Image (tube, rainbow, N blue to C red):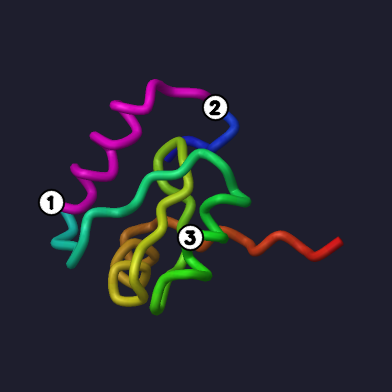
Amino acid sequence: MTHANQISPFHQLKAAARAAHERLGLRHQPVVVRSEESAFSIADRTSAGMVVLGEGAYWVVCLADAERLVNAGYEYAPRPTSR
């Protein structure tokens, strides 16, 4: 896994999410987001949305897919603290 601060072309980020979707049998393809703030904003507006540290980006996924990803070695993204 790479971290979100390492810039990759967006099509590569989407391809990594698509590969994880297929490899792990996720219910939905992760929503790929580069910005931490945007990822949590999307998750907050989504029913049961969670943010996982994907490959080079943040992935917004449902609870079931988040569990599958964590079991496969991915990590939940820590929620930024309020200012």
User: How would you classify the magenta stretch by its main secondary structure?
Assistant: helix
Q: Earlier in the sequence, mark 1 or mark 3?
A: 1
Q: Residue at x 48, y 65 (%)?
A: 43
Above or below, comparing residue 13 to residue 52 in the picture = above
Residue that numbered label 3 is attached to? 42
Above or below, comparing residue 9 to residue 47 in the picture = above
Mark 2 vs mark 1, CA separation in Å: 24 Å
Q: Residue at x 30, y 27 (%)?
A: 12
Question: Residue 55 location, x and y as percent?
Answer: 40, 40
Mark 2 vs mark 3, CA separation in Å: 21 Å
Residue that numbered label 2 is attached to? 6
Mark 2 residue element: loop
Q: Quadrant of residue 73?
A: bottom left
Residue type, label 1: Glu
Which range is magenta? 7-22
For the N terminus, which image quadrant?
Answer: top left
Mark 1 vs mark 3, CA separation in Å: 23 Å
Find residue 22 and name its label: 1
Question: Which of 13 and 20 lies nearest the eye of the viewer?
Answer: 13
Residue type, label 3: Ile
Residue type, label 2: Gln
Q: Residue at x 45, y 68 (%)?
A: 50
Is residue 10 part of the magenta span, yes or no?
yes
